[in-house]
């Protein structure tokens, strides 16, 4: 049996619509939006900005230049990419009754303030008949970390008036209110040697080789539970490779989006091995996600899955 202590932060947000959550896909000049869920990395960026305003005394975008980096809670929980030390941000499901609407604008030269002829761009956005949506999610920390969780909770309480997603300068994604539903410290345990998991969120592929990257993600995740990787066997059903998009935070707000392949949601993976390793993976797929260590997507809501014991 494998057991671990985790700290869970439960919260919800009320967000005014329109809202655009970039998914890295477009049709011509039309930028499409996520419509099933808000990714963990989007929520991490939002709450991270609030946490930085609370904890950062230097207000430095590039943490690598800050001498206080090693003692900074914002860097440790948000900007760090080391398994077991970061905050793991879960995605938030979106309501199913939202409508899609396309907004088209004319491009303007920012320096001259003159309209660029024959240059338009469009965004797909989600609209609610009520004018707002309510979402709920959670953040997971490995270990009993109530002191850090309380600081994150303060950051969540301070979100009112900030914006979530794209085109915030247009007033989209305005956060009307935020609610904390408590901080829980729980001991989770599993005892199994066979799993069948279905991905809820993608697993990024660092090199583009599916089996190589998946195996490395599993090994790195086991190490975060202080478990030496043992012989494991895993197999994939029919799977789809999709593109995920992210931004280099050190270059924000002028950085260009970066794209890389990922194992898509809905992929089924069967895993078999010794009880210790498979039990730890069952916990990881449910709470922290499975991804490669010391990469930008650690803690960003990737590699979460529905777990079935076989």
Image (cartoon, rainbow, N blue to C red):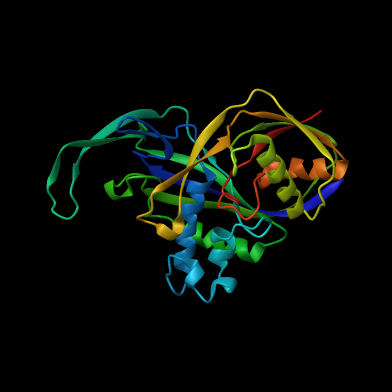
Q: Say if residue 55 shows up in the picture.
A: no
Q: Say if residue 86 shows up in the picture.
A: yes
Q: Residue at x 40, y 45 (%)?
A: 165
**Residue 136: x, y in percent?**
53, 43
- Quarter of the figure with the N terminus: top right
Which residue is the extreme one toward the bottom? 67
Instruction: In this rendered view, identify the residue nearer to me: 106 or 163.
Output: 106
* Side of 89 relative to 222 (left or right): left
* Side of 42 relative to 286 (left or right): left
**Residue 22: x, y in percent?**
41, 40
Instruction: In this rendered view, identify the residue nearer to me: 144 or 269.
Output: 269
- Quarter of the figure with the C terminus: top right
**Residue 113: x, y in percent?**
14, 51
Q: Residue at x 57, y 37 (%)?
A: 262
Q: How many marks?
A: 0
Q: Which quarter of the figure has residue 98?
A: top left
């Amino acid at each position: 049996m494998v057991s671990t202590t985790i700290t869970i932060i439960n919260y919800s947000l009320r967000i005014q619509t329109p809202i655009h959550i970039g998914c890295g896909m477009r049709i011509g000049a039309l930028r499409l939006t996520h419509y099933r869920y808000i990714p963990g990395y989007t929520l991490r960026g939002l709450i991270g900005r609030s946490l930085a305003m609370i904890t950062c005394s230097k207000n430095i975008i590039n943490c690598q230049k800050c001498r206080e980096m090693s003692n900074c809670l914002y860097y440790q929980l948000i900007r760090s990419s080391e398994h077991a030390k970061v905050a793991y941000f879960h995605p938030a499901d979106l309501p199913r009754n939202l409508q899609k609407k396309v907004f088209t604008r004319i491009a303007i030269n920012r320096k001259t303030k003159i309209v660029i002829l024959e240059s338009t761009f469009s965004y797909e956005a989600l609209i609610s008949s009520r004018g707002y949506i309510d979402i709920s999610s959670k953040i997971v920390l490995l270990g009993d970390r109530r002191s850090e969780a309380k600081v994150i909770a303060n950051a969540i309480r301070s979100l009112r008036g900030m914006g979530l997603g794209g085109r915030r300068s247009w007033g989209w994604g305005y956060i009307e209110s935020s609610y904390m539903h408590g901080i829980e410290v729980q001991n989770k345990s599993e005892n199994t040697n066979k799993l069948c998991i279905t991905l809820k969120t993608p697993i990024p592929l660092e090199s583009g080789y599916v089996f190589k990257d998946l195996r490395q993600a599993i090994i790195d995740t086991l190490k975060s539970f202080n478990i030496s990787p043992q012989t494991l066997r895993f197999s994939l059903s029919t799977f789809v490779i999709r593109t995920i998009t992210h931004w280099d935070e050190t270059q924000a707000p002028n950085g260009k989006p970066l794209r890389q392949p990922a194992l898509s949601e809905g992929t089924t993976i069967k895993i078999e091995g010794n009880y210790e390793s498979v039990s730890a993976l069952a916990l990881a797929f449910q709470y922290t996600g499975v991804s490669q260590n010391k990469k930008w997507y650690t803690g960003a809501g990737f590699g979460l899955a529905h777990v079935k014991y076989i």
